[in-house]
Amino acid sequence: MSHITDEIVEDRVTNKSDQSLVQNLLIVLSVIVAAIFIGETLFGKNSLEVYRSLQKDKKHFEEKINKIQYENAALQKEYFELKSLLPKEEEE
């Protein structure tokens, strides 16, 4: 009977160590997947760094657009002032 009891105890210990190994592998796999996800979020094509860079570019281009619009308005004003000084014959 002792022999049967020893086998049962040994099977239970083996099952627990197998379960422990599977749990450890799942934990390691979860950590690796989480690390890849975080790395991709911080440094990938759609990362926070890229987003901030695009925001900075957007602000720069909006400022440039405003400057060019102001210059365009000034040049249009000058153009129409010069146009009004020309005699009617030269306009055609």
Image (cartoon, rainbow, N blue to C red):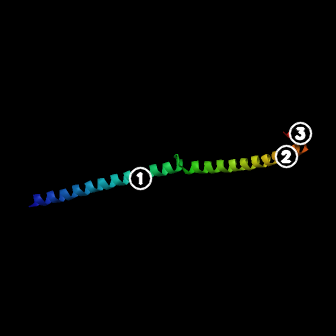
Which residue, as the protein is rendered here, is positioned at the far left? Answer: 1
- Front residue of 67 and 20: 67
Which residue occupies 69% across, 50% down? 62
- Between the residue at mark 1 and the residue at mark 2, the CA separation in whole angstroms equals 69 Å
The picture places residue 13, in percent across and down from the top left corner, at 22, 57
* Element marked by disc 3: helix
Spatial separation of the CA atoms under disc 2 and disc 3 = 16 Å
Question: Could you tell me which residue is drawn at 18 percent across and 59 percent down?
Answer: 9
Please indicate whether residue 12 sits to the left or right of residue 56 in the image.
left
Judge the density around disc 1: few (<14), some (14-19), many (≥20) Cα neighbours within 10 Å: few
Amino acid type at image mark 3: Glu
Which residue corresponds to mark 1? 31
User: Which tag is nearer the camera, tag 3 or tag 1?
Assistant: 3
Q: Amino acid at mark 2?
A: Phe
| Front position among marks 1 and 2 | 2
Residue 1, given in percent of the width and then of the height, sits at 8, 61
The residue labelled by disc 2 is 80
Q: Amino acid at mark 1?
A: Val
Percent x, y of residue 8: 15, 59
Identify which residue, 2 or 26, lies in the foreground: 26
Residue 89: mark in rendering = 3
Q: Earlier in the sequence, mark 3 or mark 1?
A: 1
The image position of residue 38, as x and y in percent, is 48, 52
Kindly report which numbered mark, 2 or 3, lies closer to the viewer in this rendering: 3
Badge 3 density bin: few <14, some 14–19, many ≥20, Cα 10 Å: few
Disc 2 on helix, strand or loop? helix
Mark 2 Cα within 10 Å, few/some/many (few <14, many 20+)?
Answer: few
| SS at circle 1 | helix
